Image (tube, rainbow, N blue to C red):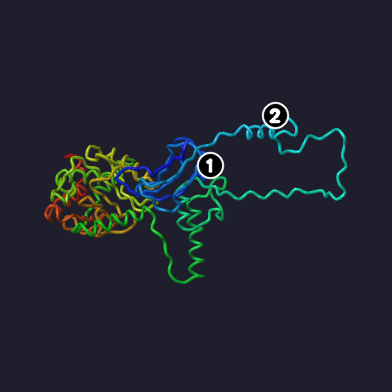
Amino acid sequence: MTDQVFLLPDLGEGLTEAEVVRWLVNEGDTVTVDQPVVEVETAKSLVEVPTPFAGRVAVRHAPEGSVLEVGKPLLTVGAVAAPSPAETYREEERAGSGAVLIGYGTSAAPAASTRRRRPPRTAAVAHPPAPAAPPKVPLVVSPLVRRLAREGGLDLRTVAGSGPGGLIVRADVEKALTKATVAESVATPGEQRIPLSGFRKAVSAALTRSRSEIPEATVWVDVDATPLWELRESVRPGPGILAYIARFVVAALKQYPVLNSRLDTERQEIVQYDRIDLGIAVQGSRGLVVPAVTDAGALTTTRLDEEIRKVTASAREGNAGSPAGTFTLNNYGGFNVDGSAAIINHPQVAILGFGRIIDRPWVVGGELCVRKITQMSFVFDHRVCDGGTAAGFMRAVADAIENPAAAIARL
Protein backbone atom coordinates (compact mmCIF):
# COMPACT_ATOMS: atom_id res chain seq x y z
CA MET A 1 0.00 0.00 0.00
CA THR A 2 1.34 3.45 -0.89
CA ASP A 3 1.27 6.50 1.34
CA GLN A 4 -2.12 8.19 1.56
CA VAL A 5 -2.46 11.94 2.07
CA PHE A 6 -5.37 13.11 4.22
CA LEU A 7 -6.52 16.61 3.19
CA LEU A 8 -8.24 18.96 5.63
CA PRO A 9 -11.93 18.25 4.93
CA ASP A 10 -14.70 20.78 4.38
CA LEU A 11 -16.01 21.45 7.89
CA GLY A 12 -19.24 22.95 6.61
CA GLU A 13 -21.10 26.29 6.93
CA GLY A 14 -18.83 28.02 4.40
CA LEU A 15 -15.67 27.65 6.50
CA THR A 16 -12.52 27.80 4.41
CA GLU A 17 -9.79 27.35 7.02
CA ALA A 18 -9.10 26.02 10.50
CA GLU A 19 -6.41 26.46 13.12
CA VAL A 20 -4.54 23.36 14.29
CA VAL A 21 -5.01 23.44 18.06
CA ARG A 22 -3.61 20.08 19.19
CA TRP A 23 -2.32 16.95 17.50
CA LEU A 24 -3.71 13.75 19.02
CA VAL A 25 -1.13 11.50 17.34
CA ASN A 26 2.62 11.66 16.73
CA GLU A 27 4.61 10.75 13.65
CA GLY A 28 5.27 7.02 13.82
CA ASP A 29 2.03 6.22 15.62
CA THR A 30 -0.30 3.61 14.20
CA VAL A 31 -3.86 4.83 13.53
CA THR A 32 -7.11 3.16 12.59
CA VAL A 33 -9.95 4.33 10.36
CA ASP A 34 -12.12 7.01 12.04
CA GLN A 35 -9.63 7.58 14.85
CA PRO A 36 -9.46 11.27 15.89
CA VAL A 37 -6.01 12.55 14.94
CA VAL A 38 -6.15 16.31 15.40
CA GLU A 39 -8.17 18.99 17.14
CA VAL A 40 -8.86 22.10 15.05
CA GLU A 41 -10.60 25.37 15.77
CA THR A 42 -12.90 27.03 13.29
CA ALA A 43 -14.86 30.23 13.55
CA LYS A 44 -17.72 28.10 14.89
CA SER A 45 -16.26 25.62 17.39
CA LEU A 46 -13.53 23.16 18.34
CA VAL A 47 -13.65 19.98 16.27
CA GLU A 48 -11.85 16.64 16.49
CA VAL A 49 -11.03 15.44 12.97
CA PRO A 50 -10.88 11.65 12.35
CA THR A 51 -8.66 10.03 9.73
CA PRO A 52 -10.23 8.05 6.86
CA PHE A 53 -7.04 5.96 6.53
CA ALA A 54 -5.40 3.28 8.64
CA GLY A 55 -1.67 2.83 8.92
CA ARG A 56 1.36 4.54 10.39
CA VAL A 57 1.55 8.34 10.65
CA ALA A 58 4.33 9.40 8.30
CA VAL A 59 4.03 13.20 8.25
CA ARG A 60 2.04 15.81 10.17
CA HIS A 61 1.89 18.63 7.64
CA ALA A 62 0.91 21.51 9.95
CA PRO A 63 2.33 22.48 13.35
CA GLU A 64 0.10 23.34 16.27
CA GLY A 65 -1.00 26.96 16.09
CA SER A 66 -0.88 27.17 12.30
CA VAL A 67 -3.87 27.97 10.10
CA LEU A 68 -4.61 25.48 7.32
CA GLU A 69 -6.91 25.97 4.35
CA VAL A 70 -9.54 23.39 3.47
CA GLY A 71 -8.15 20.92 0.92
CA LYS A 72 -4.52 21.31 2.02
CA PRO A 73 -2.50 18.28 3.26
CA LEU A 74 -3.12 17.58 6.92
CA LEU A 75 -1.65 14.13 7.49
CA THR A 76 0.19 11.47 5.50
CA VAL A 77 -0.51 7.88 6.52
CA GLY A 78 1.81 5.12 5.34
CA ALA A 79 1.43 1.38 5.26
CA VAL A 80 2.33 -0.73 8.27
CA ALA A 81 4.87 -3.23 6.93
CA ALA A 82 4.31 -6.87 7.83
CA PRO A 83 7.21 -8.36 9.85
CA SER A 84 9.68 -10.48 7.89
CA PRO A 85 10.19 -14.15 8.80
CA ALA A 86 13.56 -13.28 10.37
CA GLU A 87 12.00 -10.53 12.51
CA THR A 88 9.22 -12.87 13.56
CA TYR A 89 11.81 -15.47 14.48
CA ARG A 90 13.80 -13.02 16.58
CA GLU A 91 10.64 -11.87 18.38
CA GLU A 92 9.84 -15.49 19.22
CA GLU A 93 13.40 -15.99 20.43
CA ARG A 94 13.27 -12.95 22.66
CA ALA A 95 9.93 -14.13 24.00
CA GLY A 96 11.41 -17.55 24.86
CA SER A 97 9.30 -19.70 22.56
CA GLY A 98 11.59 -22.69 22.95
CA ALA A 99 11.78 -23.17 19.16
CA VAL A 100 15.21 -21.58 18.82
CA LEU A 101 18.35 -23.48 17.73
CA ILE A 102 21.39 -22.22 19.60
CA GLY A 103 23.72 -20.27 17.39
CA TYR A 104 21.29 -20.07 14.50
CA GLY A 105 20.12 -16.69 13.44
CA THR A 106 20.33 -15.14 16.89
CA SER A 107 22.25 -12.34 18.46
CA ALA A 108 21.56 -13.43 22.01
CA ALA A 109 24.18 -15.15 24.16
CA PRO A 110 24.22 -18.99 24.01
CA ALA A 111 22.56 -20.91 26.77
CA ALA A 112 24.72 -21.48 29.84
CA SER A 113 26.62 -24.78 29.89
CA THR A 114 26.63 -27.09 32.87
CA ARG A 115 30.30 -26.30 33.60
CA ARG A 116 30.72 -23.23 35.76
CA ARG A 117 33.12 -20.64 34.40
CA ARG A 118 35.03 -18.24 36.58
CA PRO A 119 34.55 -14.63 35.61
CA PRO A 120 37.65 -12.67 34.61
CA ARG A 121 39.50 -10.99 37.48
CA THR A 122 39.14 -7.59 35.87
CA ALA A 123 35.40 -7.81 35.57
CA ALA A 124 33.60 -5.29 37.74
CA VAL A 125 30.15 -5.62 39.12
CA ALA A 126 28.07 -3.22 37.11
CA HIS A 127 25.27 -1.44 38.93
CA PRO A 128 22.36 -0.70 36.63
CA PRO A 129 21.60 3.00 36.47
CA ALA A 130 18.63 4.17 38.49
CA PRO A 131 15.60 4.46 36.29
CA ALA A 132 14.86 8.02 35.26
CA ALA A 133 11.79 9.58 36.76
CA PRO A 134 8.99 9.60 34.21
CA PRO A 135 8.18 13.06 32.89
CA LYS A 136 5.21 14.75 34.48
CA VAL A 137 2.15 14.49 32.29
CA PRO A 138 -0.30 17.33 32.94
CA LEU A 139 -3.77 16.14 33.82
CA VAL A 140 -5.99 18.10 31.43
CA VAL A 141 -9.33 17.00 30.03
CA SER A 142 -10.73 20.11 28.38
CA PRO A 143 -9.32 21.09 24.96
CA LEU A 144 -10.33 24.66 25.75
CA VAL A 145 -7.97 24.66 28.72
CA ARG A 146 -5.15 23.35 26.52
CA ARG A 147 -5.82 26.02 23.91
CA LEU A 148 -5.90 28.77 26.53
CA ALA A 149 -2.54 27.64 27.86
CA ARG A 150 -1.06 27.34 24.39
CA GLU A 151 -2.18 30.83 23.36
CA GLY A 152 -0.70 32.22 26.57
CA GLY A 153 2.60 30.36 26.08
CA LEU A 154 2.07 28.46 29.34
CA ASP A 155 3.68 25.06 29.97
CA LEU A 156 0.94 22.98 31.57
CA ARG A 157 3.57 20.84 33.33
CA THR A 158 4.24 23.82 35.59
CA VAL A 159 0.59 24.22 36.63
CA ALA A 160 -0.84 22.64 39.76
CA GLY A 161 -4.38 21.45 39.20
CA SER A 162 -7.09 22.34 41.69
CA GLY A 163 -9.67 19.94 40.27
CA PRO A 164 -10.42 16.38 41.39
CA GLY A 165 -7.29 14.25 41.40
CA GLY A 166 -5.14 17.20 40.39
CA LEU A 167 -7.15 17.97 37.26
CA ILE A 168 -6.09 21.28 35.67
CA VAL A 169 -9.14 23.48 35.12
CA ARG A 170 -9.53 26.80 33.37
CA ALA A 171 -9.22 28.81 36.60
CA ASP A 172 -5.77 27.25 37.21
CA VAL A 173 -4.54 28.32 33.76
CA GLU A 174 -5.97 31.83 34.06
CA LYS A 175 -4.32 32.24 37.48
CA ALA A 176 -0.96 31.09 36.13
CA LEU A 177 -1.25 33.37 33.10
CA THR A 178 -2.09 36.33 35.35
CA LYS A 179 1.01 35.70 37.45
CA ALA A 180 3.16 35.39 34.34
CA THR A 181 1.74 38.62 32.89
CA VAL A 182 2.40 40.54 36.11
CA ALA A 183 5.92 39.18 36.33
CA GLU A 184 6.59 40.00 32.69
CA SER A 185 5.22 43.52 32.99
CA VAL A 186 7.52 44.20 35.94
CA ALA A 187 10.61 42.66 34.40
CA THR A 188 10.09 43.74 30.78
CA PRO A 189 8.52 47.12 30.16
CA GLY A 190 7.13 47.78 26.70
CA GLU A 191 4.57 46.17 24.46
CA GLN A 192 3.20 42.67 24.35
CA ARG A 193 2.01 41.05 21.13
CA ILE A 194 -0.87 38.56 21.28
CA PRO A 195 -1.56 36.71 18.01
CA LEU A 196 -5.18 36.54 16.91
CA SER A 197 -6.67 33.07 17.15
CA GLY A 198 -8.64 31.63 14.26
CA PHE A 199 -11.85 32.60 16.04
CA ARG A 200 -10.75 36.21 16.63
CA LYS A 201 -9.70 36.48 12.97
CA ALA A 202 -13.17 35.38 11.88
CA VAL A 203 -14.83 37.85 14.27
CA SER A 204 -12.54 40.64 13.07
CA ALA A 205 -13.36 39.95 9.43
CA ALA A 206 -17.12 39.84 10.06
CA LEU A 207 -17.21 43.05 12.12
CA THR A 208 -14.97 44.90 9.69
CA ARG A 209 -17.19 43.86 6.80
CA SER A 210 -20.29 44.99 8.70
CA ARG A 211 -18.85 48.42 9.46
CA SER A 212 -17.51 48.94 5.93
CA GLU A 213 -20.58 47.75 4.00
CA ILE A 214 -23.62 48.66 6.11
CA PRO A 215 -24.76 52.29 6.53
CA GLU A 216 -26.24 51.72 9.95
CA ALA A 217 -28.33 54.00 12.15
CA THR A 218 -29.07 53.69 15.87
CA VAL A 219 -32.14 54.72 17.88
CA TRP A 220 -32.81 54.42 21.63
CA VAL A 221 -35.83 54.39 23.91
CA ASP A 222 -36.23 54.02 27.68
CA VAL A 223 -38.80 51.37 28.59
CA ASP A 224 -40.75 50.88 31.81
CA ALA A 225 -40.23 47.15 32.43
CA THR A 226 -42.02 47.13 35.79
CA PRO A 227 -45.10 45.21 34.52
CA LEU A 228 -42.88 42.62 32.85
CA TRP A 229 -40.76 42.33 35.99
CA GLU A 230 -43.89 41.76 38.09
CA LEU A 231 -45.20 39.18 35.61
CA ARG A 232 -41.93 37.30 35.76
CA GLU A 233 -41.99 37.28 39.57
CA SER A 234 -45.58 36.01 39.59
CA VAL A 235 -44.83 32.92 37.46
CA ARG A 236 -41.55 31.78 39.04
CA PRO A 237 -39.96 29.39 38.22
CA GLY A 238 -41.38 29.97 34.76
CA PRO A 239 -39.75 31.59 31.72
CA GLY A 240 -37.12 34.27 32.25
CA ILE A 241 -37.43 37.90 31.22
CA LEU A 242 -35.27 37.32 28.13
CA ALA A 243 -37.72 34.68 26.88
CA TYR A 244 -40.62 37.15 27.15
CA ILE A 245 -38.61 39.81 25.33
CA ALA A 246 -37.70 37.28 22.64
CA ARG A 247 -41.41 36.48 22.21
CA PHE A 248 -42.23 40.17 21.78
CA VAL A 249 -39.34 40.62 19.32
CA VAL A 250 -40.56 37.72 17.20
CA ALA A 251 -44.08 39.20 17.14
CA ALA A 252 -42.71 42.61 16.10
CA LEU A 253 -40.65 41.02 13.32
CA LYS A 254 -43.84 39.49 11.93
CA GLN A 255 -45.27 43.02 11.81
CA TYR A 256 -42.10 44.41 10.19
CA PRO A 257 -40.69 41.48 8.14
CA VAL A 258 -38.25 43.72 6.24
CA LEU A 259 -36.08 43.61 9.38
CA ASN A 260 -35.88 39.80 9.16
CA SER A 261 -33.95 39.85 5.90
CA ARG A 262 -30.64 40.29 4.11
CA LEU A 263 -29.59 42.58 1.27
CA ASP A 264 -28.45 41.06 -2.02
CA THR A 265 -26.14 43.83 -3.21
CA GLU A 266 -25.37 42.16 -6.54
CA ARG A 267 -29.03 42.03 -7.59
CA GLN A 268 -30.05 45.07 -5.52
CA GLU A 269 -32.82 43.13 -3.78
CA ILE A 270 -34.02 42.78 -0.20
CA VAL A 271 -34.39 39.06 0.57
CA GLN A 272 -36.96 38.46 3.32
CA TYR A 273 -36.88 35.17 5.23
CA ASP A 274 -40.00 33.07 5.77
CA ARG A 275 -38.64 31.80 9.09
CA ILE A 276 -37.28 33.71 12.09
CA ASP A 277 -34.06 32.17 13.44
CA LEU A 278 -33.44 34.37 16.47
CA GLY A 279 -29.75 34.87 17.21
CA ILE A 280 -28.83 35.35 20.87
CA ALA A 281 -25.54 37.17 21.55
CA VAL A 282 -23.52 35.17 24.11
CA GLN A 283 -20.15 35.85 25.72
CA GLY A 284 -18.66 32.36 25.46
CA SER A 285 -15.32 30.91 26.47
CA ARG A 286 -13.88 31.78 23.04
CA GLY A 287 -15.40 35.25 22.80
CA LEU A 288 -18.69 36.70 21.58
CA VAL A 289 -20.77 34.22 19.59
CA VAL A 290 -24.35 34.35 18.29
CA PRO A 291 -26.07 30.95 18.34
CA ALA A 292 -29.61 30.90 17.00
CA VAL A 293 -32.92 29.54 18.17
CA THR A 294 -34.29 27.88 15.06
CA ASP A 295 -37.80 28.87 13.94
CA ALA A 296 -38.34 31.03 17.02
CA GLY A 297 -41.58 32.37 15.55
CA ALA A 298 -43.25 28.99 16.03
CA LEU A 299 -42.35 28.63 19.73
CA THR A 300 -44.27 29.50 22.87
CA THR A 301 -42.65 31.60 25.60
CA THR A 302 -41.87 28.45 27.60
CA ARG A 303 -40.26 26.73 24.61
CA LEU A 304 -38.30 29.89 23.78
CA ASP A 305 -36.98 29.92 27.34
CA GLU A 306 -35.86 26.30 27.04
CA GLU A 307 -34.16 26.80 23.67
CA ILE A 308 -32.44 30.04 24.72
CA ARG A 309 -31.00 28.35 27.80
CA LYS A 310 -29.85 25.38 25.72
CA VAL A 311 -28.07 27.32 22.98
CA THR A 312 -26.47 29.81 25.39
CA ALA A 313 -25.14 27.03 27.64
CA SER A 314 -23.67 25.26 24.62
CA ALA A 315 -22.10 28.50 23.35
CA ARG A 316 -20.50 29.24 26.72
CA GLU A 317 -18.78 25.85 26.50
CA GLY A 318 -17.28 26.85 23.16
CA ASN A 319 -19.71 25.20 20.79
CA ALA A 320 -21.81 27.47 18.59
CA GLY A 321 -23.04 24.69 16.37
CA SER A 322 -26.51 26.10 15.75
CA PRO A 323 -27.36 27.68 12.37
CA ALA A 324 -26.80 31.36 11.64
CA GLY A 325 -29.64 33.61 12.75
CA THR A 326 -31.75 36.00 10.70
CA PHE A 327 -32.01 38.64 13.46
CA THR A 328 -30.00 39.18 16.66
CA LEU A 329 -31.14 39.94 20.20
CA ASN A 330 -28.41 41.21 22.53
CA ASN A 331 -28.84 41.35 26.31
CA TYR A 332 -25.82 43.43 27.33
CA GLY A 333 -27.47 44.32 30.61
CA GLY A 334 -25.77 41.23 31.98
CA PHE A 335 -22.54 43.25 31.85
CA ASN A 336 -24.14 45.90 34.09
CA VAL A 337 -24.26 48.56 31.38
CA ASP A 338 -27.19 50.64 30.14
CA GLY A 339 -26.66 51.13 26.40
CA SER A 340 -24.64 50.11 23.38
CA ALA A 341 -24.35 51.07 19.71
CA ALA A 342 -23.97 47.47 18.58
CA ILE A 343 -22.55 46.24 15.27
CA ILE A 344 -24.97 44.40 12.99
CA ASN A 345 -24.21 40.71 12.56
CA HIS A 346 -23.63 40.61 8.77
CA PRO A 347 -25.50 39.62 6.59
CA GLN A 348 -28.40 40.48 8.90
CA VAL A 349 -29.87 43.98 8.67
CA ALA A 350 -30.65 44.80 12.31
CA ILE A 351 -29.81 44.07 15.94
CA LEU A 352 -31.81 44.88 19.09
CA GLY A 353 -30.15 45.29 22.48
CA PHE A 354 -31.26 45.76 26.08
CA GLY A 355 -29.37 47.27 28.98
CA ARG A 356 -29.68 46.50 32.67
CA ILE A 357 -33.05 46.88 34.42
CA ILE A 358 -32.61 49.36 37.29
CA ASP A 359 -34.74 51.40 39.65
CA ARG A 360 -35.17 54.94 38.31
CA PRO A 361 -37.51 57.86 38.97
CA TRP A 362 -40.41 57.74 36.51
CA VAL A 363 -43.64 59.65 36.05
CA VAL A 364 -46.80 57.51 36.06
CA GLY A 365 -50.22 59.19 35.92
CA GLY A 366 -48.70 62.55 36.63
CA GLU A 367 -46.92 61.35 39.77
CA LEU A 368 -43.25 60.63 40.35
CA CYS A 369 -42.46 57.11 41.45
CA VAL A 370 -39.70 54.48 41.30
CA ARG A 371 -39.97 52.03 38.38
CA LYS A 372 -37.92 49.25 36.75
CA ILE A 373 -36.43 50.95 33.69
CA THR A 374 -34.33 49.51 30.87
CA GLN A 375 -32.83 51.17 27.82
CA MET A 376 -33.50 49.56 24.44
CA SER A 377 -31.23 50.33 21.49
CA PHE A 378 -31.88 49.37 17.90
CA VAL A 379 -29.31 49.38 15.10
CA PHE A 380 -30.59 48.92 11.55
CA ASP A 381 -29.36 48.96 7.96
CA HIS A 382 -30.61 52.24 6.52
CA ARG A 383 -30.63 50.72 3.03
CA VAL A 384 -33.55 48.40 3.81
CA CYS A 385 -35.76 50.80 5.78
CA ASP A 386 -36.06 54.30 7.17
CA GLY A 387 -36.54 55.66 10.68
CA GLY A 388 -40.30 55.27 10.57
CA THR A 389 -40.08 51.49 10.20
CA ALA A 390 -37.36 51.27 12.84
CA ALA A 391 -39.39 53.36 15.29
CA GLY A 392 -42.53 51.30 14.62
CA PHE A 393 -40.65 48.08 15.36
CA MET A 394 -39.15 49.50 18.55
CA ARG A 395 -42.49 50.75 19.83
CA ALA A 396 -44.10 47.37 19.13
CA VAL A 397 -41.51 45.70 21.39
CA ALA A 398 -41.54 48.49 24.00
CA ASP A 399 -45.35 48.58 24.24
CA ALA A 400 -45.43 44.81 24.78
CA ILE A 401 -42.88 45.10 27.60
CA GLU A 402 -44.89 47.88 29.24
CA ASN A 403 -48.15 45.92 28.94
CA PRO A 404 -47.11 42.23 28.69
CA ALA A 405 -50.48 40.73 29.65
CA ALA A 406 -52.27 42.43 26.75
CA ALA A 407 -49.44 41.60 24.37
CA ILE A 408 -49.48 37.89 25.29
CA ALA A 409 -53.26 37.79 24.89
CA ARG A 410 -52.84 38.97 21.28
CA LEU A 411 -50.14 36.44 20.42
Secondary structure at badge 1 equals: loop
Q: Nearer the viewer, mark 2 or mark 1?
A: 2
For disc 1, the neighbor class at 10 Å (few under 14, some 14 to 19, many from 20) is: few
Write the residue at 31% across / 46% down.
291
Write the residue at 45% across / 56% down.
151
In this orientation, which residue lies closer to the viewer: 273 or 394? 273
Q: Position of residue 86 (x, y in %)?
A: 64, 34
Q: Position of residue 199 (x, y in %)?
A: 36, 52
Q: Which quadrant is the C terminus positioned in?
A: top left
Give the amino acid type for the residue marked by disc 2 in the picture.
Ser
Give the amino acid type for the residue marked by disc 1 in the picture.
Asp
Residue under numbered circle 1: 29
Q: Position of residue 62 (x, y in %)?
A: 44, 50
**Picture quadrant of residue 325:** top left
Left or right, residue 48 beside residue 166: left
Left or right, residue 367 beside residue 195: left
Q: Position of residue 257 (x, y in %)?
A: 15, 45
In this orientation, which residue lies closer to the viewer: 286 or 133? 133
Residue under numbered circle 2: 97
